Image (cartoon, rainbow, N blue to C red):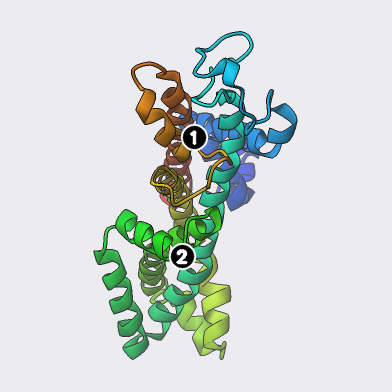
Amino acid sequence: MAKPLDGAAFVQAVDSPGRAVVRRLAQRPGALVGLAVIAVFILLAVLAPLISPYDPTATNWATVRKPPSTLHWFGTDELGRDILSRVITGAQASLLAGLISVTIALGVGVPLGLLAGYRGGFVDALISRITDAMLACPFLILAIALAAFLGPSLGNVMIAIGVTTTPIFIRLTRGQVLNVKAEDYIEAARALGNSPLRIACVHILPNILPALLVQATLSIAAAIIAEAALSFLGLGQQPPAPSWGSMLNAAQRFLANAPWMALWPGLAIFLIVLSLNLVGDGLRDALDPNER
């Protein structure tokens, strides 16, 4: 005779998968710290017009390359602009580039990966060969080529990064679909007369979302680095609008005399990328079905 469940065991038995994931994620200090840092940067980006102490584009020749002080906490740049205000406002460009470019990659890569993995045959071979050809070219080189072809602007940088990130999601989605579509419940759904579109969208896609979510988190971090690199090369956010990459480009000429010009935007990039990677690692462990 089966032993009845006590209260704690009953709660654990009926605990929803979502609550279990949140509970496992909360047990990882690194992921929590990463989430807190990301939340701070998001708040800074959203509230930038309200909390920036100075106009980020206003020049002041009386305060050129001044070190950090009570008036300018992060110092000023080569045109006398407040670096703190520019770092805060520059968060908008970096976070926007990361989110929109990965959204583009998800919107294109996931459907193509589903089609290739579920349909197979000639369609799979065609999509896979195009994906392999794009992955054979280094990510940043391809992004630079596309951004240079489209023209220097933040919008074009988002498109370039999104296109170069798409093959990653195509390959990941295809591999996950090949694993899931061999499961018994997929065969049962097919035997019940479900259409291929319904099977792909209702039965397969929800079961591969955890892997896509983890990859999306890591890809946002890579997209932020790529946006900073393209802005450093003059292909991204155009002056006088602030961007962490363009701030580093301006600071390289004054590293000896004004190191604070490079310190703060570089530190901002480091913190947001590290935090996104910590959250991605935490999500990977929390979404692992083998975790208890």
Please state which of residues 251 and 176 is positioned toward the viewer in this rendering.
251
Q: Is residue 222 above or below residue 122?
A: above
Q: Are marks 2 and 1 in contact (CB under 8 Å)?
A: no
Residue 150 marker: 2
Q: Dot 1: few (<14), some (14–19), or many (≥20) neighbours within 10 Å? A: many
Please state which of residues 267 and 76 is positioned toward the viewer in this rendering.
76
Q: Is residue 244 above or below residue 83?
A: below
Q: Dot 2: few (<14), some (14–19), or many (≥20) neighbours within 10 Å? A: some
Find numbered disc 1 in the image and state the secondary structure of the residue it sits on.
Answer: helix
Q: Position of residue 102 (x, y in %)?
A: 50, 57
Q: Position of residue 50 (x, y in %)?
A: 75, 31
Which residue occupies the extreme right position in the image?
A: 50
Q: Earlier in the sequence, mark 2 or mark 1?
A: 1
Tell me which residue sits at (69%, 23%) in the image.
53
Q: Position of residue 27 (x, y in %)?
A: 51, 32
Tell me which residue sits at (30%, 57%) in the image.
141
Amino acid type shown at disc 1: Ala
Residue 31 marker: 1
Amino acid type shown at disc 2: Leu
Is residue 270 in view? no
In the shown orientation, is residue 46 left or right of residue 183? right
In the shown orientation, is residue 76 left or right of residue 109? right
Which residue occupies the extreme front position in the image?
A: 61
Find numbered disc 2 in the image and state the secondary structure of the residue it sits on.
Answer: helix
Is residue 23 in view? yes
How many numbered discs sit on the rendered protein? 2
